[in-house]
Image (cartoon, rainbow, N blue to C red):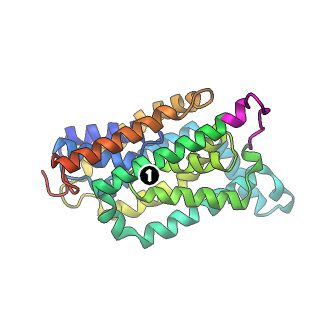
Amino acid sequence: MSWFESFVLGLVQGLTEFLPISSSAHLRLTAAFAGWQDPGAAFTAITQIGTEAAVIIYFRKDIGRIISAWARSLFHRELRHDHDAQMGWLVIVGSIPIGVLGITLKDAIEGPFRDLRLIATTLIVMGVVLGIADRLAARDETGGRHRAAKQRKSLTDLSVKDGLLYGLCQAMALIPGVSRSGATISGGLLMGYTRESAARYSFLLAIPAVLASGVFELKDAGEGHVSWGPTLFATLIAFVVGYAVIAWFMKFISHKSFMPFVIYRILLGIALFALVAAGTLTPHAGETAG
């Protein structure tokens, strides 16, 4: 992998990680369209450490408060009902599904799941799901001609059951094209949470899973056509760009709909199917290129 490729892929990772459009799919597609070799699951997982570092810095006050309350609750029972302490446990509980499935499905993640036809399918299907969830949230927030607005849940209402459901949604993102933020935000909206609450928990929940995945894949870094230097460079680019994107995204969702992302996902999925059907791209384009 050249330094230019690593720069472009790091930029793509930073731009797409927090948006509900799937960073892993866009890394895969960027390589396919450019005629580069697929960077692979290890490169993707390691560069995601950069974007998760951006999450940690952006939410540093929330994270510090949660870790402190959770740690103190281990020794002081009266603190176990504190919201921040409970959030610590809920992030742990919600991380279990993706941890178990990530190890179980490792070979599929690095192989069959990277088929462009599957990516196109998940882009479209999850785009429709996000669109439905977004419409339901908008209806509750604004009400309608014959109904009053409905109060949606915040993170103070988060339960163990909801935490596990969030975790199952996050685990779906093991398939490129699903989108970690897209799946968890959709799940949160369908469970009745506000857009901001769904997004905030989605980003907090991703931290343990992404960091663990990145560390787990470190042993495979530097093998094949992807060396350590370009991988670290792409991770740095992903961190810088990712921080700017998350700051913008949290402001955007406070007063805007997810529909632009829904439309983009569906159009991209259709275009990808068309390119594969026309023979312009093969389902495994990029896997042996470069």
Q: Is residue 11 above or below residue 164?
A: above
Secondary structure beneath dot 1 equals loop
Which x, y percent locates residue 60?
60, 40
Q: Nearer the viewer, residue 171 or 54?
A: 171
Is 142 a magenta residue? yes
Chief secondary structure of the magenta portion: loop
Which x, y percent locates residue 289?
13, 53
Which x, y percent locates residue 177?
39, 50
Q: How many marks?
A: 1
Is 104 a magenta residue? no
Q: Does residue 173 appear in this view?
A: yes
In the rendered view, does 163 fall on the left or right side of 77? left
**Region rendered in magenta:** 139-153
In the rendered view, does 229 fall on the left or right side of 70? left
Give the residue number, with chain letter if any, for mark 1: 178
Question: Which residue is most to the front?
Answer: 146
Tell me what residue is drawn at x 74 percent, y 49 percent: 84
In the rendered view, does 7 fall on the left or right side of 206? left
Q: In this view, does 106 lie above or below 73?
A: below
